[in-house]
Amino acid sequence: MATIIGGLATSHIPAIGGAIARGLQQDPYWKPFFDGFPPIHRWLEGARPDVVVVFYNDHGLNFFLDKMPTFAVGAAPEYHNADEGWGIPTLPPLAGNVDLSWHIINELVEKEFDIVTCQEMLVDHACTLPFKLFWPDADPAPVSIVPININTVQFPLPKALRVYRLGRAVGEAIRSWDSDARVVVMATGGLSHQLEGKRAGFINREFDLAFLDSLESNPGWATQFTSLELVEMAGTQGVELLMWLAMRAALGPASPSVRKVHSNYHIPISNTATGVIALETAA
Ligand code: DHB
Ligand code: FE
């Protein structure tokens, strides 16, 4: 059976794509963000994952407001990126793991999650940039992927407890996949940010740090909050942290079976508090 070897999560601001394209990783503005990654690169060199299941939220590239699934699972042989209008380079396609996609889809439907299955799916910055951050020297990253989209763009949003249960079911599906693959579960989004309205620029450091802490030892902590409470505490886009919650739920119970490899938190980039974390599951 497949093994989940760990979890990764990072913020996914488009401006990061611009910084990478212009080689600004050591620029004083960007350095505190990019400095969060080398310890995780070293861990990945040893961990050698084959497959990445990535929880992300599309921002209007593949799903627009007229057709908005709550949960959508990719089942494509290849995932293409396209211009979203941010002025960042369009990245090469990522290879899909169709076998794991259909296994996850079958298991989720069996467990009564009404998902949308996508045999074609464009992936936006939320899916593509994390692969550039975690595998900066590979183009594309040397893994196949299963993208899972969670709606955090248009209300009603799925509540945190539901997302946690989805993540747990995805973790169970991965572990029951007939394969000797080494799988990493990834999440992208957050941390606190709000891009529009009266609270544009809103950041909540105290909440972000409490959430980051909870991922190691109290993974269900955020499920006590409603989606509106999460928006209130983390901002209208900060609610993207639901992806991190799904990733963490997929890894299974709390430490010592889940150990933090490294994390970093930095304010501000753009309007967004940025974070990264790597978690390792016990063999
Ligand atoms: C920004 C943050 C996001 O999560 C996003 O998807 C787009 C832009 C930003 O901070 O600029
Ligand atoms: Fe976003």
Image: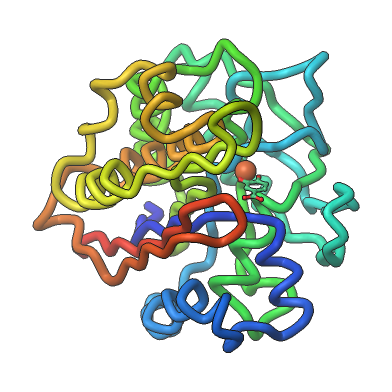
Which is nearer the eye, 63 or 30? Answer: 30
- Residue at screen point 22% across, 45% down: 210
Q: In which quarter of the image is the C terminus?
A: bottom left
**Would residue 191 be found to the left or right of residue 254 on screen?**
right
**Would residue 248 be found to the left or right of residue 166 on screen?**
left
Which is nearer the eye, 252 or 20? Answer: 20
- Image position, residue 191 (x, y; %): 45, 47
- Residue at screen point 65% across, 85% down: 137
Say above or below: 223 vs 146: above
Q: How is the image coloured?
A: rainbow
**Would residue 2 be found to the left or right of residue 256 on screen?**
right
- Image position, residue 242 (x, y; %): 44, 34
Q: Is residue 183 visible?
A: no
Residue sticking out furthest to the bottom? 26
- Image position, residue 209 (x, y; %): 27, 51
Say above or below: 282 vs 72: below
- Image position, residue 118 (x, y; %): 75, 31
Figure label count: 0
- Residue at screen point 37% across, 38% down: 245
Which is nearer the eye, 60 or 259? Answer: 60
Say above or below: 216 vs 152: below
Quadrant hosting residue 67: top right
Q: Can residue 144 be seen in this view?
A: yes
Say above or below: 24 vs 267: below
